[in-house]
Amino acid sequence: MSKEAKLELDGKVYPLPTVEGSEGEKAVDISSLRANTGYITLDDGYGNTGSCVSKVTFIDGDKGILRYRGIPIEELAEKSNFIETGYLIIYGKLPNRAQLKRFSDLLTDNQFLHEDMKFHFEGFPMGAHPMAILSAMINAASCFDERLMRWKWGETRDFDVYVARLISQVRTIAAYSYRKSRGLPLIYPKKAYKYTANFLHMLFSTPYEDFELKPEVVKALDLIFLLHADHEQNCSTSTVRMVASSQANLFASCAAGVCALWGPLHGGANQAVIEMLEEIHREGDDGSKFIAAAKDKNSGRKLMGFGHRVYKNYDPRAKIIKKACDDVLSKLHINDPLLDIAKHLEAAVLKDPYFIERKLYPNVDFYSGIIMRALGIPVEMFTVIFAIGRMPGWIANYKEIMEEPKGRIYRPRQIYTGRTLNHYAPLAGRK
Ligand code: ACO
């Protein structure tokens, strides 16, 4: 029998049921609180609020554990690849050979954008940020399928096709958005290439010459996609769930996720980390000045790539990426001064009482930018790479919302602190 919490308010005691997750996570279920007491809970930034129950991803932030559908991220990083892991996240279990083949075939069949979408790309100015183009074009892509516009969850088996289309086309859109932002001709995907190789081909090949696909480069980028594939109820995934709860279509819901991801406190941090490291390098500082500024609340600065709402320990993805970073740079014979600065910064921060007391460790974004730089990926594409990787997680969360039997729209409440009732004053009499 589950435990019961008791809340005493205005001289009355209200019993509240508790819920326990499969990994022992505990929650007080307050869904009847307002109806029974007239009170709501207030939790600025949702730090103590469970917005849903979910079967997709488990994180223990104190122990630094991350598992997709129960499988540790370390095992997946070593033994799986992005597409197999994406299938696991969306469908709940690892695919067998036939399922994986069908998924791969669907990805290949759906990789081309509608030709008319080219005109939309042309509408963006040179230099437009690829994240703006990405979110707009994911939404636009849905308009090119009449059936998707009318599609209702559970009516047909089309979901598999839409999943494959979104995962496959986000990569094509991402590559086109980069090429558009640089004024370069668009490169079509090739049937022979696997997912990540095809993305690099569309990004870097020219009409005259195919990009040389070095296996270590393809592998490193695939690992980055895999490590970003889901991360439970973060800002962008919660946004996707919020939009999906209104029964917006899959493409619209995930386009909203792209917008939420863009900010520098979330997915945009990977770009911000490189800009920070470049600034430190330019100024000839070893990072000490920047650390001092990050500790000063009046400076408006933060140490980008450090800290996490959930991890109060080393982000397990950061550990994997740090190692991959060393491997890739040594295999490609790249000596990047920013890597040295990053390592120095990390070592200094891990000894600094300010960061120790607040349990601020490097997060996934701290080293991912250095790898992407080494792979030749331009800095404005870093967050786009994150968005491509996060697509399976957003889709899995969309699916959970659609499968939710009650299907209630997400609609939080607030405590109003504005002016109480006052009345319209004619313009002539206003001060
Ligand atoms: N540099 C300096 N101080 C920091 C940092 C940082 N990077 N992160 C948190 N702190 C401080 C806060 O100022 C606060 O100090 P206080 O207790 O004296 O007021 C304390 O640490 C606790 O931080 P919170 O603000 O409660 O952390 P929150 O959970 O709200 O924010 C976040 C988490 C947004 C990730 C924050 O740590 C941050 O801004 N980090 C830098 C940006 C970043 O790397 N974002 C990527 C996150 S991972 C991802 O989205 C993939």
Image: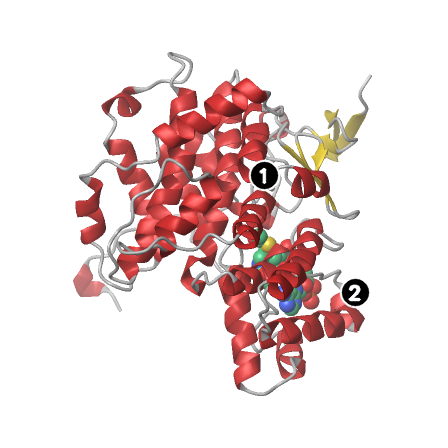
Residue toward you, 141 or 357 = 141
Residue 240 percent coordinates (x, y): 46, 37
Residue 415 percent coordinates (x, y): 52, 45
Please, which residue is most extreme toward the top here? 155
Please, which residue is most extreme toward the bottom here? 284
Ligand 1's quadrant: bottom right
Quadrant containing the C terminus in the rendered view: bottom left
Among numbered discs 2 and 1, the one appearing first in the sequence: 1
Disc number lying in front (2 or 1) = 1
Residue 153, image quadrant: top left
Q: Identity of the amino acid at label 2?
A: Glu
Quadrant containing the N terminus in the rendered view: top right
Residue toward you, 341 or 1 = 341
Cα gap from disc 2 to disc 1, whole angstroms: 37 Å
Residue 289, image quadrant: bottom right
120 w.r.t. 379: above or below: above
Side of 396 where 121 appears, left or right: left
Residue 46 visible in image: yes
Report helix, strand or loop for mark 1: loop
Residue 326, disc: none
205 w.r.t. 430: above or below: above
Seen at 57% across and 78% down, the residue is 299
Seen at 51% across and 65% down, the residue is 373
**Dot 1 corresponds to which residue?**
81
Seen at 55% across and 87% down, the residue is 283
**Dot 2 corresponds to which residue?**
357
Residue 178 percent coordinates (x, y): 34, 56
